[in-house]
Each structure stands twice: as structure tokens, then as C-alpha cells.
Image: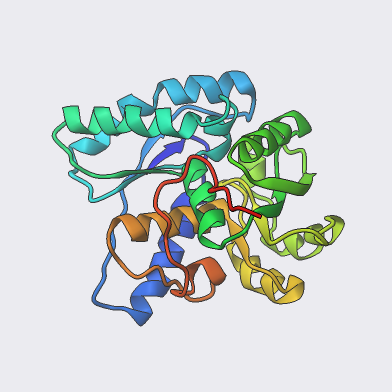
Amino acid sequence: MVVPSSNLTMETELPRMLAARERELPEDRFVFHAARARMQHVTPEQLQAMNAQATRAASELADARPDVVATACLVAIMAQGPGFHCTAEDDITRALREGGAQAPVVSSAGALLSGIAALGARRVAIVTPYMKPLTAAVVAYLTDAGIEVVDALSLEVPDNLAVARLDPADLREHHRRLDLSGADALVLSACVQMPSLPAIEAVQDDVGMPVLSAATATTFRILSELGLATRVPGAGHLLSGAVTDPGPVTRMPVHAA
């Protein structure tokens, strides 16, 4: 994984999900390696600077000959404008190839689009830890991809370490502040740094619709790229094993009325 230097959550939630999967499917074993890119505060300037370090981090990971590489900072990509996950994935892929690694590349931003598409959802509500301008950038990114955001909640926590310390149990109440009447799915955490895994299933049972996060969507894409069953117990419908991966998504398909 390529992670922000202040990220504490992705290296916790992703291994936790795959460890739970190993208990059910012990034939598949996983190891994790990360390279860090400097970022302390979730501001446009620091996010852009972090993106500039991604190829350096990818070059370091290439030496480990990984089977798949995930770049795990959704807002760093989405804040650069619609469709930027394609550019970021291409840049990291190029750095890996130059380093002799043939691993496919997944971004949490692109993975969220794929996860929403896999669920057949076109209208979502989202919870973010970001300040409102960055949440607006995420909404614009999803909208450009053909996804309607019916409601969004910004928790307005600018310090990235503080985001990691947010209690996921609070999400069981935060989601009640959203209008879900027109939603097909709920993105409980549109940020890989905001912990949400312990709340995914409980909130899903409460709202009666699929609930996903940037982290569960990234895990879904990782398993898909590895050609493995997309099943992780306790991680929501997207990782139930019953959802078909649509592959990388830039825009949602248009269906005739």
C-alpha cells in the first residue's frame, strides 16, 4: 500500500478484514507492506504534495515484488478533480513497471466508484471526516462519475491523526443525521483514515440498504484483482461474496429509461 504518513487506519482495517477472511478461507494468506508519503493535515496543499510523492513510494514497493498495490488516500485523489484516479493509477503503474514489478494498481478513489457500481447503486449518501469544501470535492467527483449524492455529512476534522482517533461506534448515530430516503447505498466512511469497520454491519442492518466504506471498497478491488472470492465476513454486503466486480470504473453506465 501507498499510504499517507499520518494514516493509522488502512493498515489496521485492511489486515483485519483479510484476517477474518483467512479464518473462513485458510487457503488464501496475505502479507502487507507499505510505503508512506508525507501528509499531516487534510488540506488541498498537503494533499497535492502527497500525490507528488506517490511514484517514489511505488518505486520502493516495486522492490518487494507485490501481487497488487493499493494507493490509499481517497480525498488526495478526488481533490485533484474528476477522473484523477485514472491518472494516479497510471503514474503508479508506470513507476512499478520501471522498477520491474507487474502488480495491478488499485486506488481507494477508483475502488469506491467500482464498489458503488458493483452494488448497482446510482444514488448514495456519504459521511466524511473532511471540512465542507473537501466534502464538496468528493461530491463533485462522484457526481461527475454519474453517481447522485443525495446527502452528505461533514464531520469537519482537519487533523489526519485526529481522524484516526474518531470512534467508529459514533457512526451508528451520525448516519441518522442523513436523509436516506432517496439513497440506494450508504458510504459510511468516504475516507480510508476514518475508522468504520466495526459499524458497517450494524448500520447496514439498521438502514436496510447496502453500506460500504472506502476501505471495504478497496478490499473488494484488491480481492478482485487477485482473482479471489470477494468475501469478508462482517464487512457489509459488498464483501458478502454475492456481488460481481464490474472492473475499473471511470463513469457509471447509462441505462435507458
Task: Name the residue: 67% across, 33% down.
Answer: 140
Indicate the position of residue 148 as horizontal and vertical percent values: 70, 46
Q: How is the image coloured?
A: rainbow
Indicate the position of residue 18 as horizontal and vertical percent values: 39, 66
Quarter of the image where one finds residue 71: top left
Residue at the extreme bottom of the image, as rendered: 24
215 is higher (above) or lower (below) than 158: below
Q: Nearer the viewer, residue 167 or 211?
A: 211
Task: Name the residue: 53% across, 55% down.
Answer: 117
Give the position of the C terminus as an image quadrant. bottom right
195 is higher (above) or lower (below) than 231: above
Relative to residue 170, is residue 24 drawn left or right?
left
Quarter of the image where one finds residue 24: bottom left
Give the position of the N terminus as an image quadrant. top left
67 is higher (above) or lower (below) than 201: above
Q: Nearer the viewer, residue 67 or 249?
A: 249
Residue at the extreme left of the image, as rendered: 100
Task: Name the residue: 64% across, 52% down.
Answer: 189
Indicate the position of residue 83 as horizontal and vertical percent values: 51, 31
Residue at the extreme front of the image, as rendered: 257
Relative to residue 95, is residue 240 drawn left or right?
right
Task: Name the residue: 63% across, 47% down.
Answer: 190
111 is higher (above) or lower (below) than 172: above
Quarter of the image where one finds residue 62: top left
The tally of labels here is: 0
Indicate the position of residue 231 as horizontal and vertical percent values: 42, 72
